[in-house]
Image: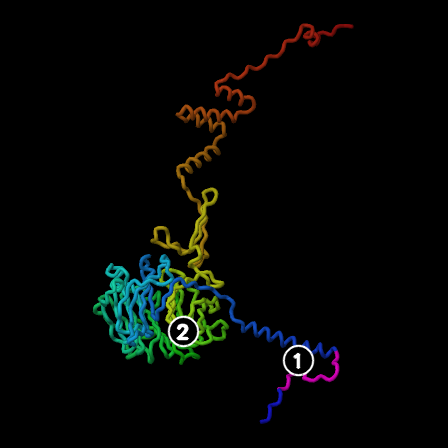
């Protein structure tokens, strides 16, 4: 074989031959350094661009348990229920000595008041199939029928089981009912955010169903479409719109996302990323407050945020051009309901990354472990996050740090402070509800809805005192001080008060009259005026000028 010739150096790279004959002039070294400096600068700039992000935050794991499961938080805001977590065993079931798998539905306590770092099992029952999805809804809570709602579990055989949490806590395997329509594993379950009796289910068979659980023993079935199937391939995620009750979204292994309008039973929008059409979707999340924004993640380094008012392309796209993006695929995604600007993703690189949903910019990394197959923010307790990993770790984390973004739950929604002169300074949302909770304060002039307003107002805490003070100011301005005191002394019926006003009136006298009157008011006689001294006769005669001139 003939060895390949050495590559010829390009001009300006500062590469010299291996043999140098004789000393080179000083100018040649200087020219070589000038050629090397731009190359070194460009190389340094390239290294800086490829450097990984430096913002990293620590998500503290407060509770953990060794479980291969899918979980759902209790939707109740009652303190004794909000720390409960429903766990359903997934395909990675336990294998005993007889090679038999056991699948369980379990309720776990994640209360921080308990000193143990492990979650405590409140109760569990055994089920015949493994769980592929699980949801905990508010069915019957408003009516008092189910104090903690009900748990719906999607099983690998396509059936959906309904259970009462209190019966699970008592280790009673009794089921409230079953929903049987899917021909493959139930890949997604979600209760309606406002119509609590509605449950949406998605299956690996490509169909989407809506169940009315008013009667849990006989659930009624409906479809959001009139076609045979909702998707040509298996459905990977499903999500109700948080603000519009008749809008439902579903995404499939084909990389297609459909927006269903339940009023017309058809898909009103069909979204697919042009470059990611053949990649399966892994996550689907509606914006917590904006009804027209939805985020989709793919089985690749791509996350898109769509604004349904702008058809044809996503408004925000996060892909591998961003150095902080996962190099492989995005395995799961969760939009923080308490801070709408935080979108959390987890990839096969065992990293949890927080993105600013407003522009797709990188916020920070979260140490969540992994690789994760599920992320869930707590519905009512900010900063609480549950994760499930492929390694069989179930963990509850707390997170308060999102890099340059301060979470909204750490900000003061409103405040008040007293100043001098009865002034009261307050700040709060411009559209915040009033004290009685019935009406909302409209934004002031030049204000936008959702902004913060600052108000300065006077507060009267002693109305009777203020009334007398205003009357005093008016009368002092209408009468001279001495006449005002005389007027109040004549109007007073109390002897002590009359004497006080007369003394105050004496203080406004002028000259020596002030002293004389004060003495009289105090019960003393003022001193008599001193008489003029008498002169001697001779002195008087000398002092008196003669009336007639005397001759000399």
The magenta segment is: 7-25
Of 75 and 290, the residue lying toward us: 75
Image x and y of residue 434, in percent: 37, 52
Of 141 and 471, the residue lying toward us: 141
Q: Earlier in the sequence, mark 1 or mark 2?
A: 1
Image x and y of residue 209, in percent: 28, 73
> Magenta span: helix, strand or loop, mainly?
loop
Q: Quadrant of the N terminus?
A: bottom right
User: Are the residues tagged 1 and 2 within 8 Å (C-beta)?
Assistant: no
Q: Quadrant of the C terminus?
A: top right
- Residue reaching furthest bottom? 1
Q: Is residue 70 left or right of residue 53?
A: left
Q: Quadrant of residue 413?
A: bottom left
- The residue identified by callout 1 is 14
- The residue identified by callout 2 is 331
Q: Secondary structure at mark 1?
A: loop
């Amino acid at each position: 074989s003939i060895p390949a010739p050495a590559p010829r150096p390009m001009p300006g790279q500062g590469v010299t031959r291996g043999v140098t004959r004789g000393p080179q002039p000083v100018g040649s070294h200087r020219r070589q350094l000038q050629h090397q400096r731009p190359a070194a600068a460009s190389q340094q700039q390239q290294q800086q661009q490829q450097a990984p992000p430096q913002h990293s935050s620590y998500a503290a794991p407060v509770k953990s348990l060794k479980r291969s499961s899918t979980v759902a938080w209790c939707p109740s805001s009652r303190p004794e229920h909000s720390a409960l977590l429903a766990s359903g065993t997934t395909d990675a079931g336990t294998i005993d000595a007889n090679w038999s798998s056991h699948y369980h539905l379990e309720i776990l306590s994640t209360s921080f008041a308990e000193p143990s770092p492990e979650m405590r099992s409140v109760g569990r029952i055994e089920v015949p199939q493994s769980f592929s999805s699980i949801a905990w809804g508010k069915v019957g809570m408003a009516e008092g029928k189910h104090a903690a709602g009900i748990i719906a579990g999607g099983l690998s055989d396509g059936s959906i089981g309904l259970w009462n949490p209190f019966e699970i806590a008592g280790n009673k395997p009794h089921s409230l009912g079953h929903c049987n329509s899917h021909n493959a594993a139930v890949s997604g379950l979600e209760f309606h955010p406002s119509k609590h009796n509605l449950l949406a289910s998605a299956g690996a068979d490509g169909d989407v169903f809506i169940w009315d659980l008013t009667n849990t023993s006989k659930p009624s079935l409906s479809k959001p479409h009139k076609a045979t199937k909702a998707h040509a391939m298996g459905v990977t995620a499903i999500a109700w719109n948080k603000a519009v009750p008749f809008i439902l979204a579903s995404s499939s292994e084909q990389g297609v996302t459909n927006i269903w309008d339940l009023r017309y039973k058809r898909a009103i929008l069909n979204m697919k990323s042009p470059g990611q059409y053949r990649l399966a979707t892994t996550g689907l999340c509606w914006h917590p407050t904006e009804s027209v924004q939805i985020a989709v993640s793919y089985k690749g380094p791509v996350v898109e945020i769509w604004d349904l008012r702008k058809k044809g392309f996503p408004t925000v796209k996060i892909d591998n051009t961003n150095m902080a993006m996962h190099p492989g695929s995005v395995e799961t995604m969760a939009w923080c309901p308490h801070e709408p600007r935080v979108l959390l993703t987890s990839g096969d690189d065992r990293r949890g990354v927080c993105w600013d949903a407003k522009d797709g910019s990188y916020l920070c990394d979260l140490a969540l472990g992994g690789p994760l197959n599920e992320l869930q923010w707590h519905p009512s307790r900010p900063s609480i996050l549950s994760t499930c990993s492929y390694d069989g770790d179930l963990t509850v984390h707390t997170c308060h740090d999102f890099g340059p973004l301060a979470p909204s739950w750490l900000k003061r929604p409103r405040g008040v402070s007293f100043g001098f002169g009865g002034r009261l300074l307050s700040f709060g949302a411009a559209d915040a509800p009033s004290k009685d909770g019935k009406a909302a304060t409209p934004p002031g002039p030049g204000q936008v809805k959702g902004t913060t307003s600052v108000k300065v107002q006077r507060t009267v805490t002693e109305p009777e005192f203020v009334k007398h003070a205003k009357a005093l100011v008016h009368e002092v301005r209408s009468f001279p001080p001495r006449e005002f005191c005389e007027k109040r002394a004549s109007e007073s019926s109390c002897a002590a008060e009359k004497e006080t006003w007369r003394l105050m009136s004496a203080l406004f006298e002028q000259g020596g009259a002030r002293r004389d009157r004060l003495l009289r008011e105090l019960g003393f006689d003022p001193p008599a005026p001193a008489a003029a001294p008498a002169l001697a006769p001779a002195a008087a005669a000398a002092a008196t000028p003669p009336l007639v001139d005397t001759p000399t």
